[in-house]
Image: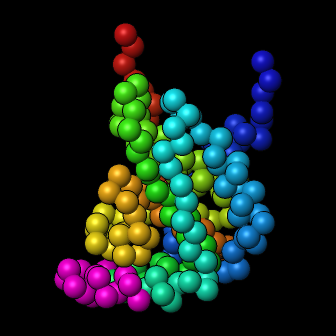
Amino acid sequence: MIINNNGIDFFTKRRSVSVKALKGPGPAIEETLEILQSALRVPDHGKLEPWRFIIILEESKDRFIDIMLRRGQEISIDFDKLEKNKTNILNSPLIVTTICCTKESSKIPEIEQILSAGALCLNVLNNFLVRGWGANWLTGWMAHDRVFVEEAFQLGADEFVAGFIYVGNYDEVSRERPRPEVADKVTWF
Ligand SMILES: Cc1cc2nc3c(=O)[nH]c(=O)nc-3n(C[C@H](O)[C@H](O)[C@H](O)COP(=O)(O)O)c2cc1C
C-alpha cells in the first residue's frame, strides 16, 4: 500500500471557490492544457471518451456575453440573473466548458457515459483546486437551453453541457458549507 498524504490532505479539505471571489490572471495556456491532460485520467467504461472541452478565454468573453445576453432576454431570464451570469463570466479568466458527447454503443449504456462526463467535471475542478487555482462547477440555463448551446458552441444533437468550470485566481477562501455526516449516508448490507 502506498499512502499519498498530500492527496488525503487535499481530499479531506477540498472546497470550491465562489465565482464571486474569482479574478484574473488565470493560468497560462500551457498550464491549462497540462491540468486538463491530468483531468482526462477519468473512469470511462468502454473507452468511448464521451466528452470534450470548449475553452472560453478572456479574449472571447465579450462575444460569449453578447450571445448570452441576447438569448437570455429572448427567453425572459430575469435581468438580475443575467447580470449575475455576466459578472460570473467577467470575474473568471478561464471557463472550461465540459461537453458530454454520448456515443452509440450496444455495450455501454448512455447513463454510464453521462456519469463519466460528470466525473470529468469533478476531475477538472479538483485538478485546478489542487494546483492552487480557484474553481467552481456551475450549470444553470446557459447549460440547459438548446438554442443557446447550439448557437454559442455549435453542439450536436447528442451533446450537452455537463458543466462550466469557472477558474481564476482568488484571495478569499470560501466559507465552509454544511457537509453531510457519513453515518447518515451509510447503511450496511
Ligand atoms: C452539476 C452541478 C451543477 C451546479 N450548478 C450550479 C449553479 O448553476 N449555480 C450554483 O450556485 N451552484 C451550482 N452548483 C454547485 C456549485 O458547484 C457549488 O459551489 C458546490 O456545491 C461547491 O461544493 P464543493 O465545495 O464541495 O466543491 C452545481 C453543482 C453541480 C454538481
Q: Is residue 109 above or below residue 52?
A: above
The one of 102 and 166 positioned closer to us in this rendering? 102
Query: Which residue occupies 35% across, 70% down?
Result: 150
Task: Give x and y (percent) for residue 183.
Answer: 42, 27
Query: Which residue occupies 44% across, 85% down?
Result: 65
Left or right: 31 with respect to 142? right
Task: Give x and y (percent) for residue 32.
Answer: 71, 64
Q: Is residue 125 magenta?
A: no
Count of marks, rendered view? 0
Q: Is residue 73 magenta?
A: yes
In this picture, which residue range is highlighted in magenta?
66-81
Query: Which residue occupies 76% across, 72% down?
Result: 28
Query: Which residue occupies 71% across, 56% down?
Result: 35
User: Going by the picture, which residue comes out furthest to the left?
Assistant: 76
**Quarter of the N terminus within the rendering:** top right
Left or right: 66 with respect to 122? left
